[in-house]
Image: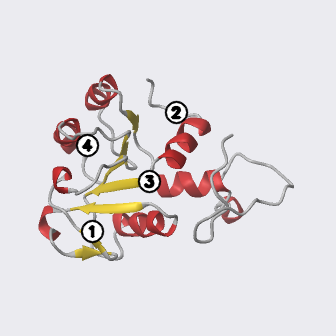
Amino acid sequence: MKHDAYDNSYIADILSSVKTVAIVGASANDVRPSFFVAKYLIDKGYKVFPINPGHAGKEILGQMTYPHLADVPQPIDMVDVFRASAAVPGIVEEVLALDPLPKVIWMQLTVRHDQAAAKAEAAGIKVVMDRCPKIEYARLAGEIGWNGVNSRVISSKKPVLKGGFQSFGLRSR
């Protein structure tokens, strides 16, 4: 798959199908992007598992933090990577050792590793690179269009409220 651009339906299908998200590189520091992405996903109803060896055994946002993906006590649907691109091959190896395999590996803004992505896709895992699930969810749900962020949607229709905290819900386009 080419990873230079993604159809809205591809991203919306991912975000509406996953329920559990492991955040590799999660931080307990409330000014770090991984912290507020975790908070946002929790507020939207996702079960979040922070992964951070230096914080293992402690809580981040009320969620137990684990040192490694293999330590998470239930299946993971999506792995969100908050690490440098050079760390991605090792994370993909950790993901491929899980049973069952996650459905998605999501690499955060500026994180990209095409060879590791190809390896994950060969195993049947969807991959998103250089995107933020918080931004994509809010964009597709129409939550950030009023903020001046280009949502590529012009509509006079009132948003349909769906479940979740201050959520318009995901809409496939």
The nearer-to-camera label among 3 and 2 is 3
x and y percentages locating residue 78 in the rendered image = 37, 47
Mark seen at residue 85: 4
Marks 4 and 1, Cα distance to the nearest angstrom? Answer: 18 Å
Q: Which residue is mark 3?
A: 19
At 45% across and 48% down in the image, what residue appears?
A: 18
Marks 1 and 2, Cα distance to the nearest angstrom? Answer: 28 Å
Q: Amino acid at mark 1?
A: Ser
The nearer-to-camera label among 1 and 2 is 1
x and y percentages locating residue 146 in the rendered image = 71, 64
Q: Which residue is mark 1?
A: 27
Marks 4 and 3, Cα distance to the nearest angstrom? Answer: 25 Å
Give the mark nearest the N terminus, 1 or 3: 3
Q: Amino acid at mark 3?
A: Lys
At 50% across and 42% down in the image, what residue appears?
A: 14
Give the SS element for disc 1. loop
Give the mark nearest the N terminus, 4 or 1: 1
- Screen quadrant of the N terminus: top left
Mark seen at residue 5: 2
